[in-house]
Each structure stands twice: as structure tokens, then as C-alpha cells.
Image (cartoon, grey):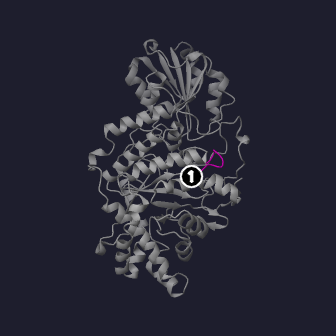
Amino acid sequence: MITQQDRLSYDAKARSIVKQMTLDEKIALMSGNISMPWLMLQQFITGNGYNHIPYPAGGCERLEAPPLLFCDGPRGVVPGENTCFPVTMARGASFDVALEQKVGDIIGKEIRAVGGNFFGGVCVNLPYNPGWGRSQEVYGEDTIHMGKMASALVEGVQHHNVIACVKHYAFNSMEIARFKVNVTADKRTEREVYLPHFKKAIEAGAAAVMSAYNRYDGTYCGHNDYLLNQVLKGEWDFDGFVISDFIWGVRDTVGGINGGCDVEMCNCHHYKPAKVKKAIQNGQIQVDTIDEAAIRIVRTLIAFEEAEDPQAYPASLARCEEHLAFAQEVAEKSTVLIKNDDHVLPFDEDQMRNIVLVGDLAETENTGDHGSSYLKRAKADNLVSAMEKRLGQEHVRYVRTRDAMEAKGLLENADAVVFVVGMRHSDEGEYISTFTKMGGDRRTLGLHAEEENMLAELGSLNQNTAVVLIGGNVIVLDPWIEKAPSVLMAFYPGVRGGAAITNLLLGDANPSGKLPFAVAKRTSDYPAVDWDAEEQHYD
């Protein structure tokens, strides 16, 4: 893996390259090369969606300085057709750093296979409240745990000479208000709770950092001299470069560049040469500041470009069978057994001649958020198809949520009943305000009322009953938990989640995960948050 010492060994070469650049060429290093009208047109014409190709930024062909080629995450590689792993919160439940390093290893391989060199998917924001819609993208609620798991992901990705980017720095744990909220915290909370995991990932060698949309202590994080220049580049001796979150991560030219944001992504708006040169002429930005950013960018990219690859990266690596099988293993090792009265689980496969699967999510491809982390071409399975493949279609019955109350006789006489309930991308995730709201933060942490009523009424009809919970963070278990003999938390289990849950229910795998968060009795037991606030204090 490329270490800080390795990267710094390219300092002289980077300085030589930057010294030969014109001012326009140096400024061009500092922004994405995507045209937003082109991007939107391509998405409309092709239907491929966000990040369907690695997004380019910077580069200088004349002087052989390579471009940044951005691939989003963190469930897997967004461009192309790649392996969709269980969400990060699920992998956090494994508490297995070796497992997570191998996840990073596969992600690194698949990024190289699709032509990328940058992974924007090491997400380590610590949730202040578990209702945060994107908390599925992080490992849990403990800074030490978060730091160790993120470090493993960094090491796995960078083993294949792919730059690992840690995000969103910092205090980014609200979705609906993410573009406007100002977060405050006292220094002890800042340094003991919300920053140590970022520092740990930097110490593990992460070569890039993405700033957050929100403000911290009054200043946007993409302009925040304290966070970016004083803490990250100063105290932590970070040698890589900082990129903005996309489109709105930088709000003005002078604030972004002086604040320490080296690259505006994914398009160029505030870092256009005319705007930057005007600020230089007015004395608002120093050329030395541009030079420092350029050196950081070039030094990092050439270090990774020129490093010896540990293997070849043919296109056939992407979503290959070996990777898909490992994604299933991760799902099995991440699932948590919350309850198992009278050893209901595992079910005896020899006795399963009539198993009933209840709930819309049993037949849904449900890999989590449909925002920037969405692997649109995941081709994930579901529990109905996996169980039918295992037991035979004639032995599996499926009942939709709305029909469950009329199926009491079917449930009572079944050999086993499995309820699949919980969340989907419309309930939680990256908040995208379109014609129909997508994602956002959860204001309550329980199941949908229809599902709660179903479990309260039907959960104890059959002694061989299991409830499978789907979701990215806490799901409050009251008032139905006493009705259900056994409960599994499967999170969003990825491309082969249905096969993994089947193996867990039938005893071929052990649900060895542990909850990476505390489950309270009521939503009101957690810290209060106004998800649409302009000001939020973190205790």
C-alpha cells in the first residue's frame, strides 16, 4: 500500500511539474471536468444515472499529470456493474476488521477494472441521532470502532493503488438540513467524539478527504480554515488533498481556496480560471496557495499512478462470482440475532414443506439508499426467490403485507413463518428533493404502523416464526417484540442478501453480528434533533 512516506517521495517531482505549469493549468487541476448540462442530458438519454462512469477531475496531459477518476461508494463501486455489498452499518455489525479490509480489497479491484483511480466511499460521520438517513453508510456510533473499521477499508482499497477518500469532514449527520445547518460542539466533544475516527483513517494512510456540506461553528466545512488547514493539514500532517462534496460543497471562490479545499467537485463553477485569477489580482488569493494545492494534487496522483500494481485488472473482475460469493459471506457474518426464544432458529430444513414469507420486503430488491451510493445495476436477489431456489417453489408461499391479516389460517398451519419488515430507500437515505421525495431522515424509529400492527396481531400465531428486520440503523422493537419468537437484524444485506438470510434461517450460517448501536425503547429516548434546523448543537 502507498504510505505517506511513499507519497512524499514524489514531492520533488510534483514541484517540478507544477513549476512548469501555467497558472491556467494549475487552476485546472482544482476542479472536476464534468459539464452539468452534459451530465443531466446523459442521464436522461441513457437512464444510467449518477456516476455511471468514473468522473474525471484535473490532470495535465501536456506534463503527464494524471487526472482524478472518481468512483462513489461505499456499498461498492457505483460506475458500471459491480458487487453490491451489505451497507456499511451491516459491516460494522461484523466487528471484523479483516473482513472489512477484504471488502476494500475487492472494491479497489473493481474500481481499477472500470477504469477509476479514486474511491469516494470511506464514510465515517458519527450519527448524533440514529434517524439520520445516511447513517446506513457508516459503521456505528462509537468513534474507536468507526476508526478501526474505516482504516481497514482504506488499507484494502489503497492496496490496489486506488486513492481512498474519507468523508464527509465533518459533523455531517443530518440530511434534510445538510446544505444549511450550522453545527456547534464544545472542544472536548469535538476532539473525543466527532474527529478521532477521521484522524485514525488519515493515520491509516487515506490520501484524500471530502469536506461536508454543512457549516461548523459558523463556517461551511468546504471553507473551514480550522478544520481543513489547522487540524487536518496542520495538526494531523495530512499530505493528500481535499475535495468538496459535489456541486454545492464550495460556495465561493475565495472561501473555498483559502479555506483549504483543493478540488471543487464534480464540475467547475467557483474555481473557474477567470474567477480565480480575478481574486488573485484583487489580492484575495495568493499564488502560493494555488501552488500548494496543485502540488498536493499532483504529488498524490503520480504516487498512485506510478506505484507497482499487485495484479492485473481485467474488466471481468467486476461483479465476478468470487466477489458475489464474498458479499454473501459478509451479509451472513453481519446479521444480528436479536431474539431466539426456545431455539426457534435455525429451522429444520427437512421439516420445511410449507414455509410462508410475509411482507412486501420479502420480494423486493432492497439494497438501501438510492442516492449517491446507489449501485443501480446491482441485480440483487430477494428472500422469496432465494428460498424458492433452496426449497422448491411448491414449498414456499408469499403473502404481501396488505394481505397478511386475511392469511391467519395459512400462517397457523405453516411449518414456519418469516416476516420481512423494515425500511427502503424512500424511508431513509440521502435526501433528494424531486417530484417525489427520496430518502431523508427518519422522524420516528419504529416500523411502519401497518407492519407493527401485523406483527402484534400475527407474530405469535405460529411458534416457528422469525422476523427479519431490514434497515440502516436503529429500529425500535416495541410494541411488537414480545409477540415474535425470534428476530434477526439483517440491515440492507446486499446483492445476495436473500441467499444469506436463507442460509441463516436454515442453519447453514451463524448470525454472528453484534449491534453497533444501542436500541432504546422509544424514539424520544435519543438526542432531540430538528431535522430541518439551521442550528444544531452536538452534546
Q: Is residue 67 visible?
A: no
Q: Is residue 128 magenta?
A: yes
Number of numbered discs on residues: 1
Dividing the picture into quadrants, the one containing residue 303 is bottom left
Residue 489: x %, y % from top left? 55, 32
Q: Which residue is mark 1?
A: 197
Above or below for 18 versus 122: below
Dividing the picture into quadrants, the one containing residue 291 is bottom left
Residue drawn at (47%, 50%) of the image: 373
Residue 94: x %, y % from top left? 51, 36
Left or right relative to 533: residue 283: left
Give neighbour class at mark 1: few <14, some 14-19, many 20+ (Cα, 10 Å): many
Residue 250: x %, y % from top left? 54, 68
Residue 404: x %, y % from top left? 57, 24
Q: Amino acid at mark 1?
A: His
Residue drawn at (33%, 66%) of the image: 66
Above or below for 17 versus 146: below
Magenta segment main secondary structure: loop
Q: Is residue 530 magenta?
A: no
> Residues in magenta?
125-132
